Image (cartoon, coloured by chain):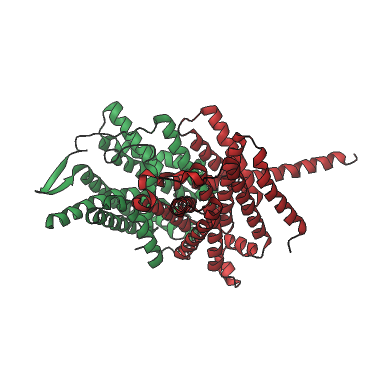
Chain colours: A green, B red
Amino acid sequence: MGSLWLQILVDALLLGGVYTLMAVGLSLAFGVTRIINFAHGDVVMYGSYAAFFAFAGLGLDPLLSLPAVAVLGAIGGYLLFKWSIGRILDDVGINQVLLTFGLGLVLQNIAVILWTGDERSTTPFYAFDSWFLTDDVVVAKGRLIAFGLAAVFVALLLAWLRWSELGRATRAVSQNRAAASLMGINVRAMYALSFALSSAFGAATGAIMSFLLPITPFMGFPIMVKAFAIIILGGMDSIVGTVLGAFFLAFAETAIAYLVPQGIGWAEGVAFFLMVLVLIARPAGILGTSGREA
Amino acid sequence: MTSVRTWIIIAGALLAALLVPHILPPGLSEFATRLSTLVLIAVSWNMMANAGLISLGHSGFWGLGAYSAALLANAIHLPFWLSIFPAMVLGAGFGAMLAYITGRLRGLFFAISTLAMSEALRVTALMIPKLTGGAEGVFLFDPIRPDRVTMTAFSLVLAVAAIAISYFLTKSRFQYALRAMRDSESAVQMLGVNPARFRMGVTALSGAIASCAGVVSAWYTGYLDPGAAFDLKITISAQIAPLFGGLYTVAGPVIGSFAVLALSELTRLYFGYSAGVGLLVYGVVLVFGVLFMPTGLMGVSRRWIKRFRHSGKLAAEPS
């Protein structure tokens, strides 16, 4: 029995790492711009395809192609902002939702047309490898790598936000757009930067997902929905809250998958039930400060 | 308050909805059924949008309606025209619950909650196969399915009723409260209107109408599974039709439904059933609609009419 609990703990921690990756990008862009990017899941999907083609065509390990994929993601995010999202910054919320939702549809279905719905995946040596902690507690190496990268990325992001000039400006815009603008910060440029960074995160996440999940044009939607649930759980405008939300969700899902009969099916729905509970009990999320006025 | 003319128009439309299906050829009749289901959810979505509530969970209402109709038809052979009542009660109840749970959440948060709730419903439908048939789906008891003409008339009548309801809503006192809520809920509250009550009312009404669309589709196709009943595509078409036609108007969702259905027929004609093209077109319409045509076809035509009149006047003026 002891090893079951240990296995649950290990699985939940590793899943939490994956979830952190999915949600941090979304949370960053939202915290700064107050626009939820419904196309974020599709950015992740394109990251996966990029990593796949680098793997299949050039034989590059997804971890090696990751930096290039992230840079491409940043460029893509910047262009999305410049051409579409940046044009409706002052519109009513409904237009922003419909626009990013539409962008997601366009991105997804271009992928369907280009690459069909076939499942693909990158298969580096560590993808199906695992490592025995004790005799019956298994640690999947792919997920362990994802966990480590998530930790590094989040630490880098927090350090950047805390100590760099641009990071400080980003936080200022997030806290008070008008005051930041009065202090001479170019708010629009910070918006563009945060979208680019968020998409870089998304694409990097995709590169990592390429050896964890089957790659299809439809992989983005469930990722996006989970990421939403996570940032609602953790508090929409807090990176640390997002990380907490990710691990909270991962623990809940893993525990249910192991302990409840037919739990794997139900675990899919846990995110939404938790979300409803949090919305009733503490609408601002675990660490959020947002007055939910967005 | 409402003029006699309005009632005559509504009665005429209802009569037409009952009679026209008898003379329509099968192809057009199917088109009419699909059009009316689209009109139902588009009108219902627009109603919520009108109050500043963005729903990304209309497939939830749709699925509830569809499942209630199918399961009741199988269990107690409830006929199609009666099946809209339990469905409407369920849809309204779910809508009210949604409004209650989301409480003070605005805009984005409301939108995400609706998306999550419809996903939660899908997972639930998948996980209780004893009731819903699970992933294998459920066939509706075939002998009590109405014939094509009845089906079309039924759906057209519902669509006309929904349009009439949304028209009356715009003429009523509620309209002012709802429209003001769209701009600023706190301001509305300051003026002594309780936004929570209006929000609950409008989501319940909208949910009831959207679940009727689900009922129609369940009787029309005769088969349901969680993936199809809670399909995101339903939500997408519910939002694209009002946006295309003209948000916040009565005629917008109807015109938009025509346009969207025509567009999807055209893409099917040109590209066949190749995967992705139809949804890609929807996405492009959404993006371009928001960026370049935020007032929809209604707004564009209004502008053209104005320009036309203007130029007419100029020409008529003596030089």
Res. A272 visible in picture: yes
**Residue in the image at 9% along x and 48% along y:** A135
Along the line of sight, the residue nearer the viewer: A186 or A112: A112
Residue A118 picture location, percent across and down: 35, 32
**Residue farthest toward the left in the current orientation of the protein:** A135
* Residue B45, above or below A107: below
Residue A148 picture location, percent across and down: 23, 47
Q: Is residue B290 left or right of residue A177?
A: right
Res. B295 visible in picture: no
Q: Is residue B35 left or right of residue A108?
A: right
**Residue farthest toward the front in the current orientation of the protein:** B143
Along the line of sight, the residue nearer the viewer: B109 or B77: B77
Along the line of sight, the residue nearer the viewer: B275 or B76: B76
Residue B245 picture location, percent across and down: 62, 45
Q: In which quarter of the image is residue A277?
A: bottom left
Q: In which quarter of the image is residue B21?
A: top right
* Residue A232, above or below A42: below
Residue B88 picture location, percent across and down: 53, 58
Along the line of sight, the residue nearer the viewer: A206 or B274: B274
* Residue B164, above or below B292: below
**Quadrant location, the N terminus of chain A:** bottom left
**Residue farthest toward the right in the current orientation of the protein:** B318
Counting labels gives 0
